[in-house]
């Protein structure tokens, strides 16, 4: 009997820069769930601290390997000058901005596994609209 896979998790070390602070290495996780097939999660800091999670489009991460993309809270930028092996994910909040550098090979491997699980263009097949509507109604109460 085979077990169905519904998620992908990759752990890696990331270099995190916050303006005015020294660069630090933090454990990072890239996570993907078929229950939310359009999104990926970047989690920073676990298990040593309370993690900080950022949810954004899987397509944004994939496109950001080739050229700078994104507006607003999340930007993804390939690092080409002296950092050919990294992709930079810029995370913005009202209070601060952090630049997170992750090995491109890790991002490529992660994305390949997510695409094997849910191919691009097939995300809609994995959406459970009944569950999503039920959660929205539950939150409205």
Image (spheres, grey):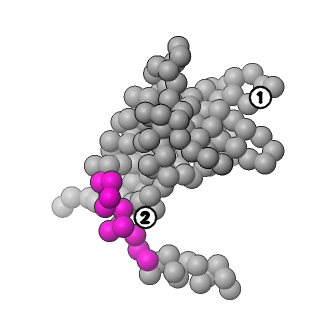
Marker disc for residue 19:
1
Residue drawn 38% across and 42% down?
111
Marker disc for residue 77:
none
Which of the 4 quarters of the picture holds residue 28? top right
Q: Secondary structure at mark 1?
A: loop
Tell me, yes or no, if residue 130 can be seen here: yes
Which of the 4 quarters of the picture holds residue 129? bottom left
Which residues make up the magenta segment? 117-129
Q: Position of residue 48 (x, y in %)?
A: 65, 38
> Which circle's residue, 1 or 2, is located before the other in the chain?
1
Which quadrant holds the C terminus?
bottom right
Q: Secondary structure at mark 2?
A: loop
In the displayed structure, does residue 123 sit left or right of residue 73?
A: left
Up-down relation of residue 85 to residue 59 (above or below):
above
Q: Position of residue 33 (x, y in %)?
A: 43, 57
Residue drawn 33% across and 44% down?
113
Distance CA(mark 1)–CA(mark 2) = 35 Å
Count all numbered tags in the image, as a single digit: 2
Up-down relation of residue 139 to residue 45 (above or below):
below
Up-down relation of residue 104 to residue 43 (above or below):
above
Q: Contact (CB < 8 A) between labels 1 and 2?
A: no
Residue drawn 26% across and 58% down?
3
Q: Name the residue tied to disc 2.
A: 35
In the displayed structure, does residue 134 sit left or right of residue 110?
A: right
Residue drawn 64% across and 78% down?
139
């Amino acid at each position: 009997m085979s077990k169905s896979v519904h998620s992908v998790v990759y752990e890696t070390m990331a270099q995190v820069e916050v303006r005015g602070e020294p660069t630090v290495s933090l454990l990072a996780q890239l996570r993907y769930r078929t229950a939310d097939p359009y999104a990926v999660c970047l989690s920073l800091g676990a298990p040593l601290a309370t993690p900080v999670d950022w949810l954004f489009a899987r397509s944004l991460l994939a496109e950001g390997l080739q050229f700078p993309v994104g507006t607003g809270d999340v930007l993804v930028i390939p690092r080409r000058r002296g950092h050919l092996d990294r992709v930079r994910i810029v995370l913005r909040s009202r209070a601060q901005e952090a630049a997170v550098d992750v090995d491109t090979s890790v991002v490529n491997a992660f994305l390949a596994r997510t695409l094997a699980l849910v191919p691009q263009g097939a995300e809609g097949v994995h959406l459970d609209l009944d569950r999503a509507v039920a959660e929205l109604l539950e939150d409205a109460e």
